[in-house]
Amino acid sequence: MKSMEEMIQAAQQAAETIQQQMNETQAKLDQLEVEGLSGGGLVKIRCSAKGRVIGVSIDDSLMQPSEKGMLEDLVAAAYNDARVKADSVANEEMAKAQQGMGLPPGFKMPF
């Protein structure tokens, strides 16, 4: 039977391993990209899976003062589309990471 000290040390090592794997997963999420679209592709926003905006593309046909309000709406819609996709990718990656750690699905890490 292990001593209390050995069990505590093993638990600390397991916690450190889990923390390292979670940090690696978070870094990976910032490298994964998704693209949100609106207006049939006239507005595109690329984001990381963490939600960081990487780039915005706006079709030249929308670059008219009379289209300002519509353009603003399309940019917001494209961002929201990208954000939903980013959340989905992030959830998938976190589930993979948790499964690799032997944690139950949906387990919330206290970080």
Image (cartoon, rainbow, N blue to C red):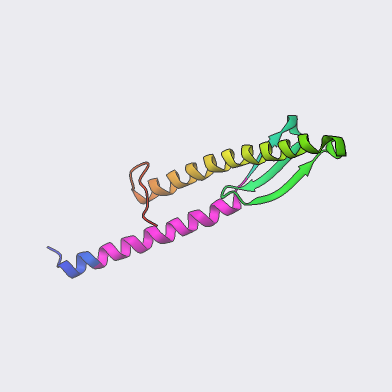
Q: Count how many numbered circles sit on residues in the image.
A: 0
For this rendering, which residue is in front, 63 or 25? 63
At horizontal 43% and vertical 57% (from top left) the residue drawn is 21
Quarter of the picture containing the N terminus is bottom left
Asked if residue 23 is among those painted magenta in the image, a careful observer would answer yes
| Residue 67 % position (x, y) | 83, 35
Residue 88 lies, with reference to residue 27, above or below; the image says above
For this rendering, which residue is in front, 90 or 42? 42
At horizontal 83% and vertical 36% (from top left) the residue drawn is 62
Residue 40 lies, with reference to residue 54, above or below; the image says above
At horizontal 27% and vertical 62% (from top left) the residue drawn is 11
Quarter of the picture containing the C terminus is bottom left
At horizontal 68% and vertical 40% (from top left) the residue drawn is 76
| Residue 110 % position (x, y) | 36, 55
Residue 11 lies, with reference to residue 100, above or below; the image says below
Judge left or right: residue 110 versus residue 4.
right
Q: Name the residue furthest left.
A: 1
| Residue 12 % position (x, y) | 29, 65
Judge left or right: residue 58 versus residue 90.
right
Can residue 16 be seen by looking at this rendering?
yes
Specify the principal SS of the magenta part.
Answer: helix
- Which segment did they paint magenta? 9-33
For this rendering, which residue is in front, 70 or 59? 70
Q: Name the residue furthest top.
A: 40
| Residue 3 % position (x, y) | 14, 67
Q: Name the residue furthest bottom.
A: 5
Asked if residue 14 is among those painted magenta in the image, a careful observer would answer yes
Can residue 60 be seen by looking at this rendering?
no
Location of residue 35 (image quadrant)? top right
